[in-house]
Image (tube, rainbow, N blue to C red):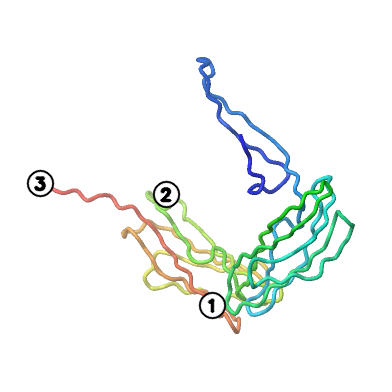
Amino acid sequence: MTLDAKKARGKNITKTVTVFSNDPGNPEFKLSIKGTILEILETRPLALRLQGLAGGDLSGSFTFSAGSPLDVEIIEMKTRGSLLEIGELEVVTAGREWNLPLLAKASVRPALIKEKLVMVVLTSDGEERTLDFLVQLDHRPRIVLQPKQNLKFLNRETTKLIGGGEPIEKSILVTGGDKTVEFEVTGVELDPKIADAFQTRIEVVSPQKSYRVWVTLSEYQSKPTVLGKLMIRTNDAVRNEISVWVMGQFRQAGKKTSR
């Protein structure tokens, strides 16, 4: 068994393999293999992410520390892309720990972009190594939805409504893309095509910061698919209307045909 350490991050790794034998009493059994990966450089936080509102630069500082007994000398840093800029490296403890500021150029539109930070290091065993770190550049909209685009009520869920099952509720979390954004969800409107099938309500999670829009399906529908838009209205000057697709699936019994 071979493990590619470049594709596995985190110190504790567990892999399971199935062993087959000609033993009639135990022809197959699971073998759990545990191990520890010592990284040349560990990062804090583990995921490198710059986050902020679209239209402005993103910035952040990250800690790199030696993850093995080997001391490390960082001899070169570069990016594989044009959007990420590297600040001045601060040595906290020689050979063991550093702070590195990173900056991302502004994006006019919301976007999640991935860039690579490359470090060439010399370790105390005399080896020169090239290390790649993935950096996410999260240019966020002023108001963020979770889930982002649609809300689905699938067949396996809606069939529970046959015969008077409990209503199905799902929600959309509405939050500011940055802690500085303040807004209110002022209303919710359903497309006329789905207004009879679904009901909505608004829950205040944190005033001016976070809201939850609940969508309820109470009755099984006679159409195979019900699809339409839900419009969330806010008092935000920039993003005052946000639309989301809502879909319901209803498996219909096959029609009998006479010969």
Total marks in image:
3
Neighbour tally class for label 1: few under 14, some 14-19, many 20 plus, Cα within 10 Å: some
Residue type for callout 2? Arg
Q: 10 Å neighbourhood of mark 3: few (<14), some, or many (≥20)? A: few
Real-space Cα distance between discs 2 and 3?
32 Å
Give, as a three-letter code, the residue at label 1: Arg
**Which quarter of the rendering shows the N terminus?**
top right
Closer-to-camera residue (57/198): 57
Residue located 77% across and 50% down the image: 40
Q: Position of residue 123 (x, y in %)?
A: 81, 51
Can the viewer see residue 246? Answer: yes
- Residue occupying image coordinates x 55% and y 29%: 18
As displayed, is residue 15 above or below residue 77? Answer: above
- Residue 84, located in which quarter of the rendered image? bottom right
Q: Which dot marks residue 156? A: 2
Query: Any mark on residue 233, and which?
Result: 1
Q: Percent position (x, y) of residue 221?
A: 35, 59
Calculate the distance from the C-alpha at mark 2 to the C-alpha at mark 1: 31 Å
Using the rendered view, name the quadrant where residue 64 is placed: bottom right
Q: CA distance from mark 3 to mark 1?
A: 54 Å
Residue at 37% of width from left, 49% of height from top? 163
Which residue position is annotated with label 3? 259
Report the side of 162 relative to 39 (left or right). Answer: left
Amino acid type assigned to the residue bearing label 3 in the image: Arg
Q: Mark 1: which secondary structure?
A: strand
Label 3, secondary structure: give it. Answer: loop
Labels 3 and 1 touching (C-beta < 8 A): no
Judged from this view, the residue extending furthest toward the right is 93
